[in-house]
Each structure stands twice: as structure tokens, then as C-alpha cells.
């Protein structure tokens, strides 16, 4: 595949398999300009790290138009300074300690219930039968939302995700996404009112009762953080789980090693996040003219960090295109923290606030499935396909087991 003046990240070829373009992008077109959407695509590990950590030059201001309309208020990633520190701390507290222990119990219970009907069949689609409904149910439990509403919530949330992760949506598509986001907001409004009156143990209650500078957050602020948690906890979760199993099935020797030594599971998850990050793009906006990777990017430009490309940069990882849970440059222990070398959770001030929760979720669920499923293999005759440019993962993952 060529990377030239006519190459486009918006092309069907790129969408079919972006990975085969990454080395040429890094080597020949490290700051790729996409004129149709007037945006720059950054592919080297070094440059992506710079964009994500130089907060003075690269801001999150574009989230005002890329996210706020459907989040119905400001999300954590838009905030700066003392407000960001305080509100981030509130969310961190909602995902650690006793709260996290309770969440792990909910993950177990939901996973066991969802997988049960498939055990006697010996066949399951890990995305559509399991991962997707699990991600939704777990998140509803964390927030204390009613699971009988899961279908409606999932549909509205799909609109929010489509808007936030859309690259070139038509005005009509944007309109439909906004409409679904407004319905989600209307659904949450009475729930938030109720939690203010009678707070429980759930995350919505914690957001309602937490104080910043002695003042509780407004309904608009709580709503935005709730939708923020919903999208961020649901959208990448089923993708990561399916990708982990895909890579292990395709590398039977490493699957065997993880089975014999479950202590290797965190390394397999970290390597999955490096090799195929479910969030492939992270946007920023330039505050001033800046020289990046030898090119000048003008002030006010939108810059997309290409996480998948950066994670396979040979300057950062040896044999980057190999899936290897034993690689010495991965640093598994650090992989779910600010010191991670892979960039699947971003980097800098806005690095994923849910990383520890994500780790607990996928370790719990993957460990459980590995103990329930023997002799895992792809279902014969089913074609494997990945979709998505912003978030990317298997459309389905049909597996057989005994
Ligand atoms: C929701 C994009 C799935 C986040 C976003 C506006 C902010 C932020 C992310 C992730 C994953 C989603 N961005 N989570 O990339 O909260």
C-alpha cells in the first residue's frame, strides 16, 4: 500500500486494515494532513507522546464541538487546573477501594449470568452475545441504573458514541445523534433528582453529593460526567475482550502459557492494548503554530494522535508487529498506570481515569472465561472483520469451545 498525496485515512482501504499503512505513515508522512476534514494525523510514538503531554500547546478545546453537544455538558477531558484536579479525584474515588471491590462482584455476577446459556452449546459470539451486553450491564450497575432500561439506554448511547467518534458525519447523522443524546439526558434527569434526595452507594449518588470548593455539582455537570462514564466504560470494553481472545487463539503457544500460568494474563491484556488499542484516535487542538515531527502545524488546527500506529513504532517497541506477551519493553506492571509505554490509555493529565477499573473488568472476565472454556478455536467458516476508525474492534468473534 502506498502513502502518497492521494492516500487518505478516510479511504475504504485504510478502514479495511489500517495496520498495513502504519509503517509508511510513520516513515514518510509522520504528520499526515487530511484536507477533506482539515486535520493532521500524527503516527510516531515520540510525536504522539509530545502532543498528549505538552498541554500548553495541544489543548482539548475542540471537545466543545466534538463532544459537549452530545455529552450535554463538559467532560473531564475538557477541564483544566483546579477544577480538573478536583473532579478527576471525585471520579477516581468512585473507581477505587471499596467501590472497586463492589464493582468486581458486579462484574462476576453479570458475566456468569450472561455466559450461562452458552456453556452447553459450545459456541458463542464474544462481541454480540457476551462482551457488548456485559459492558452495558456492568456500567449500569456501577451507576445504579435500572437494567430493564438497557435496550433504550444502549440505543441512546450509540448515538452519543457515534457523534464523539465520528470523523466525517453528515449534518443529518449529527442531528440524529443529538436527538438520541437529548433523550438520554431526559432519562437521566429524574434519576439524578432522586439520587440527590436519597443518595445510595452508586457512582451517580457520589457525583451528586461530592463537593467542589464547597459547592455540589449542577445537574448539567453530573449529567455530562454520567454520560462520560457510560461511553468510556462501554465503548472500548467488548472490543478489548474480543481482541484479547482473538490474539490468544491466533497464538496457541501463548494461550497455553496463559492457561498454565494465569499470572501471565495481565501481560496478555497489556500486549493486546499495545498491539490493537480499541481507541485508535485521540484528538487535540493546537494553541499556536508548532513544529511537530519536522512539519509546521498552524494554530487552531485539529490533530489526531494515531494510537495504533504509535504503539507499533519500532523506535518504542522491538518487533512491534509481533504479538508477544513476553516482550521486555512492555512493562506490564506499569501498563495500567501513568507510566505505561503503550498509549492505549493516552498519556499526560487526561490519561484514562478508568484504567484500573478497565483492568479489573477484563482480568475478571477473561480469567473466568478461560476457566470455563476449553479448547477455544474460531468457529469454522466464519469470516473475521474489524470495523471503526476512532474506536476499532471485531464486528463479531465467533468461537467454539468444549
Ligand atoms: C468521551 C472515546 C470511547 C473518554 C470522550 C469525549 C472523552 C474521552 C476517549 C475515551 C473513550 C471514548 N475520550 N474516553 O477517548 O472519556
Image (spheres, rainbow, N blue to C red):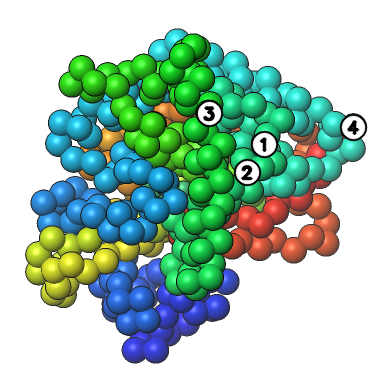
Q: Label 3: how many residues lie within 10 Å, few (<14), some (14-19) or many (20+)?
A: few
Foreground: disc 4 or disc 2: 2
In what element is the residue under mark 3?
Answer: helix
Distance (Cα) linking label 2 and label 3: 18 Å
* Residue on which disc 4 sits: 120
* Residue on which disc 2 sits: 154
Q: Residue 238: x and y, percent? A: 60, 43
Query: Which residue is drawn at the image coordinates 64% and 21% (left, top)?
Result: 108
* Circle nearer the N terminus (3, 4): 4
Query: Which residue is drawn at the image coordinates 32% and 18% (left, top)?
Result: 210
Distance (Cα) linking label 4 and label 1: 26 Å
Q: Residue 214: x and y, percent? A: 20, 17
- Residue 365 to residue 8: above or below: above
Q: Label 4: how many residues lie within 10 Å, few (<14), some (14-19) or many (20+)?
A: few
Query: Which residue is drawn at the image coordinates 68% and 46% (left, top)?
Result: 127
Q: Is residue 150 visible?
A: yes
* Residue on which disc 1 sits: 150
Q: Label 2: how many residues lie within 10 Å, few (<14), some (14-19) or many (20+)?
A: some
Amino acid at each position: 500500500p502506498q502513502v502518497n498525496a492521494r492516500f487518505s485515512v478516510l479511504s475504504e482501504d485504510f478502514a479495511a486494515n489500517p495496520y498495513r499503512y502504519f509503517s509508511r505513515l510513520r516513515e514518510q508522512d509522520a504528520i499526515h494532513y487530511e484536507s477533506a476534514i482539515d486535520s493532521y494525523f500524527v503516527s510516531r510514538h515520540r510525536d504522539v507522546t509530545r502532543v498528549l503531554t505538552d498541554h500548553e500547546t495541544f489543548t482539548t478545546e475542540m471537545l466543545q464541538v466534538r463532544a459537549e453537544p452530545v455529552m450535554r455538558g463538559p467532560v473531564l477531558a475538557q477541564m483544566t487546573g483546579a477544577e480538573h484536579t478536583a473532579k478527576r479525584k471525585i471520579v477516581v474515588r468512585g473507581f477505587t477501594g471499596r467501590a472497586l471491590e463492589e464493582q468486581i462482584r458486579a462484574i462476576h455476577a453479570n458475566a456468569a449470568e450472561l455466559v450461562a446459556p452458552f456453556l452447553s452449546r459450545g459456541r458463542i459470539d464474544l462481541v454480540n452475545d457476551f462482551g457488548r451486553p456485559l459492558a452495558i450491564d456492568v456500567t449500569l450497575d456501577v451507576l445504579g441504573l435500572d437494567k430493564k432500561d438497557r435496550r433504550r439506554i444502549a440505543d441512546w448511547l450509540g448515538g452519543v458514541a457515534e457523534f464523539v467518534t465520528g470523523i466525517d458525519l453528515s449534518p443529518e447523522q449529527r442531528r440524529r445523534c443529538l436527538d438520541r443524546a437529548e433523550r438520554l439526558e431526559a432519562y437521566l434527569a429524574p434519576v439524578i433528582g432522586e439520587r440527590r434526595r436519597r443518595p445510595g452507594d452508586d457512582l451517580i449518588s457520589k457525583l451528586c453529593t461530592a463537593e467542589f470548593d464547597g459547592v455540589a455539582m449542577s445537574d448539567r455537570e453530573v449529567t455530562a460526567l454520567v454520560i462520560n462514564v457510560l461511553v468510556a466504560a462501554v465503548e472500548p470494553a467488548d472490543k478489548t475482550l474480543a481482541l484479547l481472545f482473538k490474539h490468544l487463539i491466533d497464538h496457541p503457544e501463548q494461550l497455553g502459557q496463559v492457561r498454565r500460568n494465569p499470572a501471565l494474563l495481565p501481560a496478555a491484556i497489556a500486549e493486546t492494548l499495545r498491539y490493537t488499542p480499541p481507541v485508535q484516535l485521540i484528538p487535540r487542538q493546537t494553541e499556536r503554530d508548532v513544529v511537530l515531527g519536522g512539519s509546521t502545524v498552524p494554530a487552531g488546527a485539529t490533530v489526531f494522535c494515531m494510537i495504533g500506529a504509535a504503539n507499533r513504532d519500532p523506535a518504542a517497541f522491538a518487533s512491534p508487529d509481533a504479538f508477544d506477551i513476553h516482550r521486555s519493553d512492555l512493562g506490564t506492571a506499569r501498563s495500567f498506570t501513568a507510566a505505561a509505554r503503550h498509549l492505549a490509555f493516552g498519556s499526560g493529565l487526561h490519561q484514562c481515569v478508568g484504567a484500573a477499573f478497565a483492568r479489573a473488568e477484563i482480568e475478571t472476565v477473561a480469567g473466568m472465561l478461560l476457566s470455563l472454556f476449553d479448547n477455544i478455536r474460531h468457529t469454522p467458516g466464519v469470516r473475521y472483520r474489524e470495523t471503526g476508525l476512532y474506536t476499532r474492534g471485531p464486528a463479531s468473534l465467533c468461537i467454539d469451545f468444549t
